[in-house]
Image: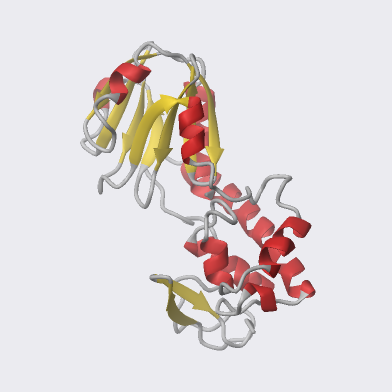
Amino acid sequence: MPEVEAVCRKLRPVATGRVIEEARILRCAPAEMAPTVRGRRVVGVDRAGKHILIRLAGDVTIHTHLRMSGNLFVIPDHRFASSRARVVLELDGGGGIVLEDARALARMEAGATAEIEASIADLGVEPLGPEFTFERFAAMARGSRQPAKLFLMDQTRVAGLGNIYVAEALFQARVDPRKPMQRLTLRKLRGLHAAIVNTLTHAVQSAVVAYSRPGGFGEAEEFPRAVYGREGAPCVACRRAIRRIAQGGRSTYYCPGCQR
């Protein structure tokens, strides 16, 4: 989510108010998207979890999910989109909104705003929004037997949390990723709620810095990691070796000394 937020912040001021004169669909989007967006003005750019919503005039929305390797940005001349471009939205004045993805994993679609919003209606609470209160978080946790890591990765509970930031928030809160949520004490839950907000706030700031440089950027590129990707390295707090286990088909990194 932090990287997606950085993309939206970069896209919003340069795309809003521009008219999409043509759409070149190469991959990652259905061909019928072109006539849907052609001739429409961009009126806003929003984010819901990891989803990018480009609002167009006439209650039409372009919905993009960057997945593992996509990027979305504006270039000054749409004729010079790179070979990695999968969709090019040609703008008035010659610029272009480009969906770029070397692995072609990203997805873009367009449709009536009500239909697009209905398709993502099952997203959970926005972790950096005012609705992410401790009371709401605790209520969700009390009814869940899921391990903490899998609970936080469930997009229907908390929207936008990815593997790296979940690992770092759990470490910051000193919570074992394998422990069922309903078994966490009130103190641990408060600590985890605060750690999620703190981790994501700093991650967004780091992502914005990384995205301000020319070229692409990687997930958590500027974000300091205490546990993620550090298997076998000493813990920054207790010096015990960081461990890696598999949970839900993904790698989980944690400190066996700090996270109990």
The residue shown at (73%, 64%) is 138
Task: Say which of 56 and 71 sits in front.
Answer: 56
The residue that appears at 45% across and 84% down in the rendered structure is 232
Tell me, what colour scheme is on the image?
A: secondary structure
Is the residue 71 above or below the residue 173 in the image? above
- Please say whether residue 224 is visible from this viewpoint: no
Q: Position of residue 129 (x, y in %)?
A: 68, 45
In this orientation, does residue 140 appear?
A: yes
Q: Nearer the viewer, residue 15 or 163?
A: 163
Residue 76 lies left or right of residue 150; in this view the side is left
**Where does the image place residue 43, in percent across and percent down from the top left?**
53, 19
In the displayed structure image, the side of residue 235 where residue 233 appears, left or right? left
Q: How far across and down, in percent of the image, does residue 44 sit? A: 54, 24
For the point 53% across and 47% down, the residue is 122
* Residue 154 image offset from top left, x and y in percent: 52, 60
**On the picture, is 109 further left or further right than 160?**
left
| Front in this rendered view, residue 180 or 49 | 180
Which of 256/236 is in front? 256
Count of numbered labels shown in the rendering: 0
| Quarter residue 31 falls in | top left
Rendered position, 88 above or below 118 = above
| Up/down of 59 relative to 166, above or below | above
Residue at position x 72%, y 46% in the image: 131
